[in-house]
Image (cartoon, helix red, strand yellow):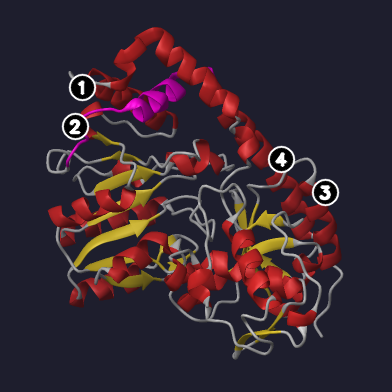
Amino acid sequence: MFCTIHLSKSDPTPLYIQLASELAHLIKIGEIPERTKLPTIRTLSRKLKINRDTVVNAYKVLENQGLVVAHVGSGTYVSPLTSQKDYEPETNLQTISCSTLSFNKDYFPTSLITQLTEQIIALEGWGAFSDPLYRERNLLRQSICQFFKSVGIMTTPAQIRFPKDFCTFLLDLLKVHPSSTICVEAYHDLTYSSFLRSLGFKIIEIPLTDDGLDLTYLEKQLQTEHIGFIWVSSYVQNPTGISYSPECKNRLIELAHLHHFYIIEDGTLSDFTYSHECLKPLYTLDSHGQVIYLHHFSKLYLPPLQYTFIALPNSLHKKINDPVACTFNERLLHFYLESDALGSIRQEIIEKSYLAYLKVYEALSAASHLLEIYSHKGSLFFWIKPTKISSEAFYDCFLRHHIIISPGEVFTLKSKCTYFRLSLAHLDDHTLPLMIDCLKELSTLEMN
């Protein structure tokens, strides 16, 4: 029955809302009978080829509507008699998504596409659709270099790559330095590690400390494992918000040189460090050519496209394939990088995110007697652990306010996690006060 579920990534409706609507429809028509146990989060995410976070949030929406019941340690079941209720699946549920790091599409109106397209055609005419001398590719590389400079990365056009399909680039990278073992942070975005595991790579989760990776644990792994890559976020780590200390960074680079592995440094969230400390990327500290820096640019500042910006070390840039030509999409990207529009959008997003961070942190602090709160140096999210209330009571408080947050299980290969991530990316002038109201109620809860 679940093979009939259809989800569209081109649909502006969030995937978890689409999935909740599809499941609700199957429940209503009796295709999924009452008291039926729904597939586990891992099973359904694998079957539908979607992130586990999407399934978790869809199940929570259904639970909030009384269509399913979750039993800790047992699973999620269709509620009794729900198939006989008059129910029309909603595609525009009034929920606040605090489970994603992508920004509201209002920042990226279709008028922006029209404006850039008109500029390109007016300047280049039909030439906009071809690049026989690779001139546009070189100009785009230079523009990406300037963007990297704004986040503290100094690199050259020859070291730049800008794949639309990051998974393909990742496979090309692994072919250059073959190893079946890759280390990741103990809590991380599972998108790419799950992809690599499906291809047979061994993934080892390295615990995190307040200073960054637990290097003592890593060194023990290096004694027995042939590790090819270590994937880290050296500042504003997703989802913990940890920023690596200078000592941790320098020692990690030393280990990479000593044991001949590469560090993949994800700096996508570098704009959202609100600390006055000078946080230097590993890439700028590396003198051995062991660090690969990446920024998932489109995830933040150009959602309709899928570009990732990559700065390779000198030891690798001649070994990794480069696109042979630029299409109209790459021209659009180039004009966008050079436009005033990107600067304005970027500044507005950073300023509004900072304001949301300050207000949410203040409200969370009022509940500090019930919670452990992380991400003190600022970021797009908070990593929260209920201590004096149950995880169920914590989650239910948000659900009563129709706010969806991410349980910690979606960031680790382990089955149990008592943390939650609360994202700020979708909060605006309307939803931020609703979030504050929720947190005020949260501060009044007590352990049952």
Q: From what the image shows, is residue 72 above or below residue 226?
A: below
74 or 180: nearer the viewer: 74
Tell me which label, 3 or 2, sits earlier in the chain: 2
Residue linked to disc 1 = 134
Furthest residue to the top?
A: 123
Q: Which residue is mark 3?
A: 433
Kindly identify which numbered label has been placed on residue 355. Answer: 4
Residue 185 relative to residue 133: left or right? right
Q: What residue sits 59% from the left and 42% below the top?
A: 274
Q: Secondary structure at mark 2?
A: loop
Q: Earlier in the sequence, mark 1 or mark 3?
A: 1
Q: Which residue is mark 2?
A: 324
- Which portion, as a residue range, is magenta? 321-340
Callout 3 crowding tier (Cα within 10 Å): few <14, some 14–19, many ≥20? some
Position of residue 138 in the picture relative to residue 334 (left or right) = left
Residue 265, position as x, y percentages in the image: 35, 50
Amino acid beneath label 1: Tyr
| Mark found first going from the N terminus, 4 or 1 | 1
Quarter of the picture containing the C terminus is bottom right
Say what amino acid the circle numbered 3 marks.
Pro
**CA gap, disc 3 to disc 4?**
12 Å
Q: Mark 2 or mark 1: name the one nearer the start of the chain.
A: 1
Label 3 element class: helix
Residue contact at pointers 2 and 1, CB within 8 angstroms: yes
